[in-house]
Amino acid sequence: MSNSMVSAKSPSKGLAKRKKTIVLLSMLAPGAIWLVLLRYLPMFGIVIAFQKFTIYTKAPTLLNNIIHSKWVGFKNFEFLFATSDSWNMIRNTVGYNALWIVLGTVIAVAFAIMLSLITKKFVAKTYQTLMFFPYFLSWVVASYFLMAFLDPTYGLISHLQKQAGMEVTQWYFINKPWPIILTIAYLWKNIGYSTVLYLAAITGIDSSQYEAASIDGASKWQQIRYITIPHLKPMIIILFIMSVGRIINSDFGLFYQVPKNSGPLFPTTQVMDTYVYRAFMATNNPGMSTAASLLQNVVGFFCVLTANSIVRKIDEESSLF
Amino acid sequence: MKSDTVKFVLAKRKSRMNSIGLPAEVVINIILGLFCLLCVVPFIFVVIISFSAEDSIREIGYSFRPIKWSLEAYKFAFTSNKGIWRSYFNSFFITILGTALSVLICVLYSYPLFRKDFKYRKFFTFFCFFTMLFGGGLVPTYYVSKNILGLNDNYAALIVPALFNPFNIIVMRTFFQSSVPTELIEAAAIDGSGEYNTLFKIIVPIAKPGIATIALLNALAYWNEWYLAMLYIRTEELYPLQYLLMRSQQNIDFLTRNATMLGSEIAKIVNDLPQQNLRMALAVLIVVPIAFAYPFFQRFIISGLTVGSVKG
Amino acid sequence: MKKKVLSIVLTIMTLTVLLTGCGKTKDKETTDTKTSSNNVTDTPSTDGKDPAQTEEANIDISEPVTLTWFLNGNSVSDDKAVLEKANEYLKEKLNVTLKPIWGTWGNFEDNVVLSISGGDDVDIYFTSSWTQNEYNKYAKDGAWLRLDREDNNLIEKYAPDAWNMLPDILKNSAKVPGSDGEGVYALPGFKDYATQNCWDVNVTLLEKYGYTIDDIRNTDYYGFEEILKKVKEGEGKDFYPLLVEGMVLERMVNNSIMVTGDSQACNMLSYYINPTDVSKEGSYGNKIFGKFETPEYKKFVEKTREYYLAGYIDPQMAIADQANDARTAAQDAGKYLIGTQSYSLGYETQASARRGIEVQMVPCTPAYVDTTASQGAMMAISATSKNPERALMFLNLLNTDPELMTLLNFGIEGTHYEVVNGGEVKFITEARGTYQPWTNGMGNVTILPPQEGQGLNFYDTFKEYYASATAIPINGFVFDQSNVETEMAALANVGGEYALALNTGAIDPATKLPEFIQKLKDNGIDKVVDEASTQLEKFLEEKNK
């Protein structure tokens, strides 16, 4: 599988190979150490998901607290399935994610290609910079902005409706428009980010390929089809696989702050993260929130494994591992 | 020392043919222009609100055309946040140092993952990817960082926890895959170039767009970071700008959530809360530096990479 | 291919080993400590935390001690001058150096939970019935030291003065069941501890339409219609005369109260108080039940819906995260006729000045004391504290020494404030901006000098007003939800979906109320109510013994 690149010429092949491995390992070292210390070491905390977490009064260090907490099995997971709204919540979480993975990819790739085609580099740079603006604004600020349009008394839309003699829409109490509003909000905030990633991938393409193609008489559209997109494929696939890993996670701010935590909108805005947050506020049990994220991770993990193995069957090069 | 192959590959990347028809370009400009408008308008809106008089907001709510303008919010923001200049410095310091270190670590970690001849490639890919999904949760991470690693009330606490981002590693690996031809490494190896030499003198220049992008994303992440400050920083002199300004926002969030709980208490507290124009002013103060620094960051990072690599 | 599988398997294996490894040691140590903790209960002095045991009355303070103190709700950016002065004073009195952590409203919740769970070195925590480090829950979970153990009564030894000056109501409600038996786990702060829900009336506007405050006094929520209608017609379409906090409105109209322990979850359980004599049982007796099924609730939401449809209530009041902003804005602009307000002494003077209108309060009930209010601000000694005695001695001094309290709360005279009108405090805006702790969050406010405009005898009136407040029959009761957490989690979400919208009239009760009730039932409200009722019965039995 791992094809040796150091060719057979060298007499001390094994030694060179080992040396190379060691050098490459030394490159990994800083990152690997960081991972061990800041990610793997704290993982002992996962056990809290199976505990009724309490404080060990005699010597209350975290380790003692965990050691002396009672084991409760899967009880902390129950609340995720105990609600009559489980189905609704899962449908929202997975549904929005699935839709957005597809839409996000298509639009970002399209935008990146468009940007790469613009002849005036300055214009392209400007677009690219402006696209990043939403990324700087927090969801809270975005929610104020939305409110300026949708507010039933002073909002721009309500104002127009009043002028036209129409009945004012109570945006924050009716569910129908929210899947669309949330989708737009999501794309608005995230497209800039992934566009930049794809654009960088396009910029990295060896330009001689385009030259050769245009000498052969390929049109620009053919070049996109046969050079750009195939080159983007690894990036598309990798980003896809990684987003599949977060299929039941969601951007809390988008679902909580943008709809202003409005109760009547729960049917379209309740996702697992908001449900867990509201539950946590009521119960204040760290075991429950740990359990919820563990569940999300495990599900995400298996989704990634599945996606990855499918990808590997089709195109081994592009797979994650 | 570079072989001819290497020189050839590098030379080939200089120019790029780029010509599409005029109508197509117009269409593209319209689409992207509209989207950019959608991105910028909310920002302009925020700026307008921040300059609106509080009376105006009370009277007609948020509006693009306030009845009265006012500088009050900014005056207040600067007088009530004495440390604001110090925080600007902190933010720039953290962003620059953090970005430099994190990009270095990212390149160093992702490069071996891209090398197909690296024995433990799959293991370390997985080792990194696994942490993207699984983590110990907030309490244990806090405990380890603070008590074992000493990330407590110092600059390190603001930099170290964000040094490594598994997502970026995977993306960087993909950048390498799509832009670095394998022959190049082979050729370099034949030339007797050491691994580090190959990486920094040959690979990095080629993968420049990718590295610059990662650097940019890291810079933004560092600039936007406030949660770490909230968890680990107790000394106001160390506050990054984001957190200094974010605190007011958080206070509002809390009081909103507990409005019915606090009862009589809230009536008194609310008097001290920033008004709505102030919140927007804070948002502007956070965004403006980075939004305007963004193009400079971009140029700086790219030129920095160029300087560091091509010579020799 | 093989390697991939191998590496995955390897990682998983490492993890499992790690986890099960932890598990094993845990089991072992749990049994170990079980035996040892038994020993400890028998002879408490063995854990080394009670050096005073031997010293009896003579308290040894020769060892210098640093106390970390975690407070809430502050806005402090420069405490150097104050701390320097305070520490000089404390050094002399108690040989103590103070290290406060000035938590803010926004960061307290997250940080305090981390700090407690992670076992940070903190000696004193602010706690209450409404913060994330909820007094009762954390007492039960073992985060606080019990202060009144029979064999080692820390309060009696180290903080008798601070304890004795407290009103009995506060003392009694501090007694809760905790990890170390039923007792006191925190020192209550003497602040406004009564609840009195009032109609907050814009008299200026009311009189403009030819009414007087008596017209409000002589009727109730159901009789406001005529006044609201007239004012709405006069003030125009964008004016909403009824300025309500949905959850508070419901409590005011129906005389229901929050049951502590259920407060964050939309307040699903209810206890009804007696609106004329709060110390007596209400119309439903001493019982807890789900309020949403009562005829009172139905009547209330139907009327509210009418008001809403007539345009008396701003739809923004039904949007959870917008309501507070909108309400404050309307209040400050004086753009309302009748509002809901949980009263604290002096509110109307403050509000009138701020809003530029005449504000008067029309109470719905006499002032009463319930658990939530009486556990509003407390100081707990952390189980991590290495010097609990000195921490208590500090709290004792703080709550009884006007000089120290004023210094820590208001800052330095001449720098942060000046004394005017022969004893009132006037803040120097700029310096006060950098040092502004939350006054009520620190402790005994009655030893502070009054603030400008409050009048020199403010705290006499204050004590009088709060002394007149009576405890409701179930004061001190805290709902322990640990047996029904799963249900509470689900119900909190159901409550979030319907309660506020119904309480403000934004959704139609004809269809939504039955839907709401059904959903509550589906998610186990009955189980929760049963649990709460059982607990309350037990509580009352104990109390009447």
Image (spheres, rainbow, N blue to C red):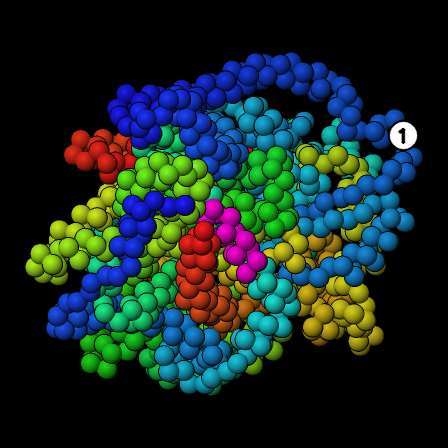
In depth, the one of B35 and A296 nearer the eye is: B35
Q: Which quarter of the rendering shows the N terminus of chain A?
A: top left
Place residue B66 in its image quadrant: bottom left
Which SS does the magenta portion mostly show? helix
In depth, the one of C214 and C455 nearer the eye is: C455
In depth, the one of C252 and C281 nearer the eye is: C252
**Residue A4 to residue C87: above or below:** above
Chain letter of the residue carrying label 1: C
Secondary structure of residue under mark 1: helix
Q: Residue at position x 57%, y 23% from top? A: A68
Q: Residue at position x 87%, y 44% from top? A: C95
Q: Residue at position x 34%, y 44% from top? A: B3
Tell me if mark 1 has few (under 14), some (14-19) or many (20+) residues whose alpha carbon lies within 10 angstroms of its own.
Answer: few
Q: Which quarter of the rendering shows the C terminus of chain A?
A: top left
**Residue C386 to residue A116: above or below:** above
Place of residue B68 in the rendered image (x, y in percent of width and height, measured from the top left): 45, 85
Place of residue A235 in the rendered image (x, y in percent of width and height, measured from the top left): 26, 46
Q: Residue at position x 78%, y 70% from top? A: C415
In this rendering, position of residue C422 left or right of residue C359: right
Q: Which residues are magenta?
A: B92-104
In this rendering, position of residue B16 left or right of residue B297: left
Whether residue C68 is visible here, answered yes or no, is yes
In the current view of this chain or complex, which residue is farthest to the left?
A217
Place of residue C320 in the rendered image (x, y in percent of width and height, measured from the top left): 40, 58
In depth, the one of C474 and A232 nearer the eye is: A232
Q: Amino acid at mark 1?
A: Glu
Q: Which residue was labeled with disc 1?
A: C55
